[in-house]
Amino acid sequence: MKTLVRLALGAAVMAGASSFVASAQSVISAKSGLIHYAEGRVYLGDQLVENKFGNFPDIKENAQLRTEDGRAEVLLTPGVFLRIAENSSFRMVTNRLIDTRLEFLSGSILVEADELLKDNGVTIVYNDYAVQIEKKGIYRFDSDPAALRVYDGAVLAQINGKSQEIKEGQLLAMNGDLKLAKFNKDDVDALYKWSKRRAEYISMANVSAAKSVQDSGMGWYSSGWAFNPYFNMYTFIPYRGSYYNPFGYALWSPFAVYDYLYSPGYYNTGYLRGGGGGGSHVSRGVASSGAHTTVAATRSGLSGTVASSGGSVRSVSSAASSSASSPVSRAGGGFGGGARTGGGGGAGGGRGK
């Protein structure tokens, strides 16, 4: 009975997925600002944002996204996520991939950069500050009190013609100068924990999406977004190799995921290979125990993926007839390709503290 239910659900998802390929193409291929997920009261201008299957509103230039009792996740350039907390707001200044620029207005936002593609740029403006994301990492902006925290990676902050690089573990009190202080990276709140859970889901959806791209036979010429209809969400697929996102969850390229799924022990050497973007990411150790069992249910893959890579969107044809009967397990802490030792993050998608 469970298998029949899964087959029926999978068929319905695939049928629904095919109906919004065109709309997905129009919003994600050439610009930043796709509202990927929202919960609670989230407003684009004066319009309440609602989650609908296959419907992802985009934030146009000069438009404002604000939250009341709600949160949202926004896709910026390929590989870069912005997550906005309750009672917060920002304005999209420009949504071009080559120079994505937004003005942080109030509350709290967190930026997760899994990869920065060549010729893509992300800048956060706050009052007189301009903060350019330089590396893969996790960056937190608050307005009360005004501060920038770098949990991982590095940014370049500029004000009044002066600039300062801010690295992991450093805090900039955005009060008119560039003086740095240290902060406790282990002292995290609900926004950070929720962002980590979202990063876990992205990793979880990556496995079947990457496999589906490979099964389709289409080329994958650059890291990019790929839509996974089973989860009704986009995930990020590296161009080549595999690596951990800043929260500690694995991301696989179409080629690497096959090695992982079908070559037992291939990754038991304890390392993930160098990452996408021309080797811009450093491989880190991965716990081999239990990693394969975490994704065993995804070996049949998932067809019907809509993929966006390097500024283009491509439709992947059905590649595995048994996909609907092989859903990804939502249990455990190592979704997708597994998590770094001590990754954790929880299994819930809700608004836990």
Image: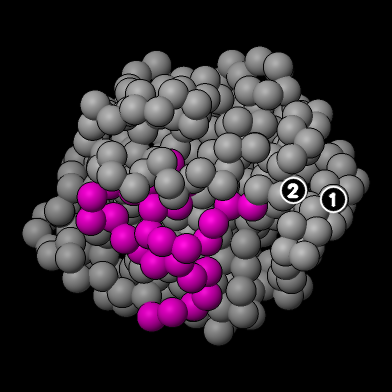
Q: Which residue is mark 1?
A: 11
The quarter of the displayed image where residue 38 is located:
bottom right
Magenta-span inclusion, residue 245: no
Residue type beneath disc 1: Ala
Q: Is residue 71 above or below residue 150?
A: below
* Range shown magenta: 327-353
Q: Is residue 208 visible?
A: yes
Which residue is found at the position 42% from the left and 74% from the top? Answer: 107
Q: Secondary structure at mark 2?
A: helix
Residue 35, percent from left and from top: 65, 57
Residue 274, percent from left and from top: 32, 22
Residue type beneath disc 2: Ala
Instruction: Between residue 5 and residue 66, name the one nearer to us.
Output: 5
Magenta-span inclusion, residue 341: yes
Which residue is found at the position 44% from the left and 24% from the top? Answer: 263
Which residue is found at the position 73% from the left and 75% from the top? Answer: 48
Residue 287, percent from left and from top: 25, 43
